[in-house]
Image (spheres, rainbow, N blue to C red):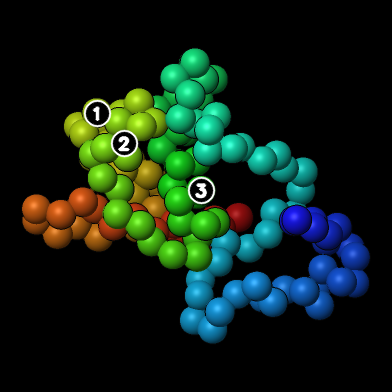
């Protein structure tokens, strides 16, 4: 069960960081209205017109990193799952990286390791 506290609720401040291990990086909670996008919605090809490729990749990264808690390796098969070729994967990762949304660690012959960057206002 997930409980979402209103930012004005005194428990919101008291609960900050309780589910986080020391040293973990986490994206700060949203201050405004938000909606949840399920992984299954991104994996459904029927939704490709709703979520363009760059958006699909960004949302997939947010889901796979647990909201920015840990990096993951973005394999070509994972990219295919969200409807991207390996060439699109590299091109779109570069766009997200250049825009400051993700950090990518590349090692020759291995899938890129992707981390989510905190959004700044």
Q: Secondary structure at mark 1?
A: loop
Which one is in front, 55 or 85? 85
Q: Quadrant of the N terminus?
A: bottom right
Q: Residue furthest bottom?
A: 22
Quickly name the residue at label 1: 85
Residue 103, by quadrant, is: bottom left
Q: Tell whether label 2 touches label 1 (CB within 8 Å).
A: yes
Task: Tell me if I can see residue 67 in this picture.
Answer: yes
Q: Secondary structure at mark 3?
A: helix
Q: Residue furthest front?
A: 1
Which one is in front, 116 or 77? 77
Residue 22: x %, y % from top left: 54, 83
State left or right for residue 111 relative to residue 40: left
Q: Residue at x 44, y 64 (%)?
A: 70
Q: CA distance from mark 2 to mark 3?
A: 14 Å
Q: CA distance from mark 1 to mark 2?
A: 6 Å
Q: Residue at x 21, y 51 (%)?
A: 111
Residue 81: x %, y % from top left: 36, 32
Residue 18: x %, y % from top left: 69, 77
The label number, if any, that marks residue 63 in the structure image:
3
Residue 71: x %, y % from top left: 38, 61
């Amino acid at each position: 069960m997930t409980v979402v506290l209103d930012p004005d609720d005194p428990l919101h401040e008291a609960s900050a960081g309780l589910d986080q291990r020391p040293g973990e990086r986490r994206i700060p909670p949203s201050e405004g209205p938000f909606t949840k996008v399920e992984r299954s919605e991104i994996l459904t090809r029927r939704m490709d017109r709703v979520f363009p490729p760059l958006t699909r990749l960004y949302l997939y990264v947010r889901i796979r990193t647990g909201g920015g808690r840990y990096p993951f390796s973005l394999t070509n098969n994972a990219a295919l799952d969200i409807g991207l070729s390996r060439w699109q994967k590299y091109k779109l990762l570069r766009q997200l990286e250049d825009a400051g949304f993700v950090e990518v660690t590349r090692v020759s012959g291995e899938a890129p390791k992707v981390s989510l960057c905190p959004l700044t206002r």
